Image: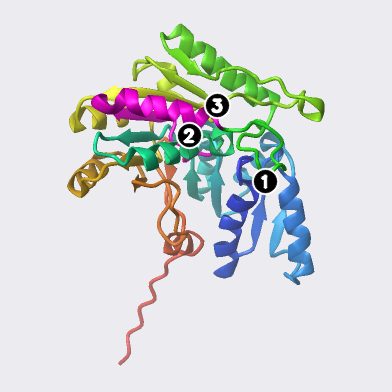
């Protein structure tokens, strides 16, 4: 069961290892972005994949997904999506003791120490904040900056964010496209307004840009930077999944580790420092499945991927996917 934000990538990421070890698969793409799954099905047919090996079923989670996760002859479920949906999957699948791989949401901390390479850090942080309109589970939505470089970082971060181009995603010069749906846009706008109520300051963005011609009714939103929030407030605790980040300052390692771990989520984190010893100690202390140091989204699909706490159960990638899509059997034979 794959989500709407990276529909083809995350679907093939699940299908490939499952088929490689001899399974047949049933795929349910998100009803919001199902065209690439339909196209993939045609390609698999043209490639000669035997009928019934890969079955793609379209529909809503309530009408189709629920039936699949409850079905007694489906032994395993690999799901990428929201935490609330995952809770429903766990409940619905419990009756039949299904194997579960759940890759869920994140509220990922981006920790910037005062010895970071600020030029590279700011450029990468803009990307990790707003790539795909922030609709990626690995985006760094909580930015923590050591206090003596806070103002310098913030100035550079704002300057580079202002250069992002909002427009048609088919235009190669566009950086920010439309959000997936009107309902999702309204959800993100709700959190921006909530940030004001919780004492935050919108220092950049926060509004729907005026678009022209065939883009005028699109669900576009300016990249938004918020400061001044307490780490326990809802905007700092709940996943927004849009082009919205918070920026806070911290004094030392002990404080920022506490702040970073102050979340129900634990998917990924990013650390910026030239001190390798510091990078190791902080990375070990963070409750996350993935930690990037001086980079973001550097991926090798063979390494384990997944989260802790409300960010998921299990790991995917390489041998971890092979383990999930197979069962270990011990056969013991005595010879006389």
Viewer-side residue, 221 vs 213: 213
Disc number at residue 29?
A: 1
Spatial separation of the CA atoms under disc 3 and disc 2: 9 Å
Q: Residue at x 60, y 17 (%)?
A: 207
Residue topped by disc 2: 129
Q: Residue at x 41, y 40 (%)?
A: 267
Left/right of residue 329 with respect to residue 94 in the rendered view:
left
Q: Are marks 1 and 3 in contact (CB under 8 Å)?
A: no
Q: Is residue 64 above or below residue 320?
A: above
User: x, y percentage for residue 249?
Assistant: 29, 23
Q: Is residue 217 above or below residue 228?
A: below
Viewer-side residue, 324 vs 66: 324
User: x, y percentage for residue 100?
Assistant: 49, 49
Magenta stretch holds residue 146: yes
Spatial separation of the CA atoms under disc 1 and disc 3: 28 Å
Which of labels 1 and 3 is toward the front?
3
Residue furthest to the bottom: 336
Q: Are marks 3 and 2 in contact (CB under 8 Å)?
A: yes
Spatial separation of the CA atoms under disc 1 and disc 2: 25 Å
Residue 81, can we see it? yes
- Could you tell which of marks 1 and 2 lies nearer the N-terminus? 1
Q: Residues within 10 Å of mark 3 (few under 14, many from 20)?
A: many
User: x, y percentage for residue 335?
Assistant: 32, 90
Viewer-side residue, 329 vs 27: 27
Secondary structure, mark 3, is loop
Residue topped by disc 3: 223
User: x, y percentage for residue 184?
Assistant: 63, 26
First to last magenta residue range: 136-163
Q: Is residue 2 above or below residue 142?
A: below
Secondary structure, mark 2, is helix
- Could you tell which of marks 3 and 2 lies nearer the N-terminus? 2
């Amino acid at each position: 069961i794959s989500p709407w934000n990276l529909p083809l990538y995350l679907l093939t990421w699940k299908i490939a290892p499952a088929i490689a070890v001899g399974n047949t698969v049933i795929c349910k793409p998100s009803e919001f972005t199902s065209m690439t799954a339909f196209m993939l099905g045609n390609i698999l047919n043209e490639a000669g994949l035997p009928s019934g090996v890969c079955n793609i079923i379209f529909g809503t989670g309530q009408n189709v997904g629920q039936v699949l996760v409850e079905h007694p002859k489906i032994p395993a479920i690999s799901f990428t999506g929201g935490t609330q949906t995952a809770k429903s999957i766990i409940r619905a699948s419990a009756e039949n003791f299904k194997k579960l791989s759940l890759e869920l949401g994140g509220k990922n901390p981006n920790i910037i120490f005062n010895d970071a390479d600020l030029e590279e850090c700011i450029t990468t942080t803009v990307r990790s904040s707003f790539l795909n309109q922030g609709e990626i589970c690995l985006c760094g939505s909580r930015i923590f900056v050591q206090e003596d470089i806070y103002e310098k970082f913030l100035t550079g971060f704002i300057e580079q964010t202002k250069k992002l181009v909002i427009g048609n995603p088919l235009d190669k010069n566009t950086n920010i496209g439309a959000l997936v749906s009107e309902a999702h846009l309204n959800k993100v706008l709700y959190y921006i307004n909530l940030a004001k109520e919780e004492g935050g300051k919108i220092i950049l963005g926060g509004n729907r840009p005026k678009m022209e011609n065939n883009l005028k009714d699109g669900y576009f939103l300016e990249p938004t930077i918020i400061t001044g929030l307490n780490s326990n407030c809802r905007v700092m605790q709940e996943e927004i999944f849009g082009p919205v980040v918070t920026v806070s300052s911290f004094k030392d390692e002990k404080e920022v580790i506490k702040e970073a771990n102050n979340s129900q989520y634990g998917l990924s984190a990013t650390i910026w420092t030239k001190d390798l010893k510091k990078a190791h100690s902080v990375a070990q202390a963070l409750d996350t499945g993935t930690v990037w140091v001086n980079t973001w989204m550097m991926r090798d699909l063979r390494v384990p991927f997944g989260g802790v706490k409300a960010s998921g159960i299990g790991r995917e990638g390489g041998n971890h996917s092979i383990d999930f899509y197979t069962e270990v059997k011990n056969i013991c034979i005595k010879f006389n």
